[in-house]
Image (spheres, rainbow, N blue to C red):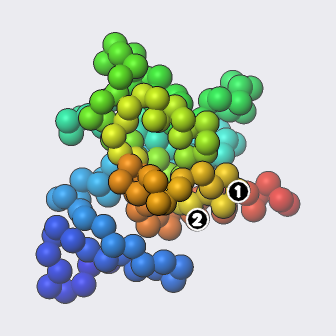
Amino acid sequence: MFESGQRRNSAALRSSKCVCFFIILGGIMKEYMNLALHEAQKAYKKDEVPVGAIIVKDGNIIAKAHNLKEKRQCVIEHAEIIAIRKASKKLKSWHLDNCVMYVTLEPCQMCKGAIEQSRIKKVYYGAESYIYKCIDNNVSRETYIKLCSDEASNLLSKFFKSKRK
């Protein structure tokens, strides 16, 4: 994954579909995205759309969640919304100032609204949503940052292929 001689503070992750450059602070961002992927795998096992999210504040994970829309038969039970609810409960405030979210799929319009209302300062997402694409890169470039996540894309593809059989 890393080329010989690369420094730990920057790396190029190359795949057949994209080349993503991003800063890795001691591998922490990748670890957080892997935790979000673990949540997505939990959703997959429950026959939910495999999306996972975590919220971090001051280096501490304060919430983890995955989609539960089918289980709860409620359209708003997206990973991001559940994670925001858990983080708000933990902090005893709906103000999630200085929090960062890691989510395996680009947030939909509903989740984007909740993220902005809760004042989460940054969102790192894995796979792009080609159906509900709502992140305007000109406006949201500093808040929403795409991390190249082939694992997230592959898990989503596997899930939807299984549904088409």
Residue 154 circle label: 2
Horizontal and vertical percent for residue 66? 54, 37
Name the residue carrying label 1.
Answer: 131
Horizontal and vertical percent for residue 147? 41, 62
Residue 2 circle label: none
Q: Can residue 34 be seen in this view?
A: no
Q: Point out the tag, 1 or 2, that comes first from the N-terminus.
A: 1
Give the quarter of the image for residue 63: top left
Q: What element carries label 1?
A: loop
> Measuring 66% from the left and 46% from the top, which residue is drawn there?
49
> Measuring 85% from the left and 60% from the top, which residue is drawn there?
165
> Measuring 47% from the left and 23% from the top, which residue is drawn there?
85
34 to 23, vertically: above or below:
above
User: The N terminus lies in which quarter of the figure?
Assistant: bottom left
How many numbered circles does the render carry?
A: 2
Q: Which dot, 1 or 2, sits closer to the camera?
A: 1
- Farthest residue toward the front? 139
Q: What residue type is labelled 2?
A: Asn
> Measuring 21% from the left and 39% from the top, which residue is drawn there?
59
27 to 4, vertically: above or below:
above
- Farthest residue toward the right? 165
- Pick the residue in front: 3 or 20: 20
Relative placement, left or right, of 53 versus 25 is right
Give the quarter of the image for residue 109: top right
Q: Which amino acid does label 1 sit on?
A: Ile
- Farthest residue toward the top? 92
- Pick the residue in front: 26 or 47: 26
Horizontal and vertical percent for residue 137? 48, 60
Q: Is residue 157 visible?
A: yes
Give the quarter of the image for residue 77: top right
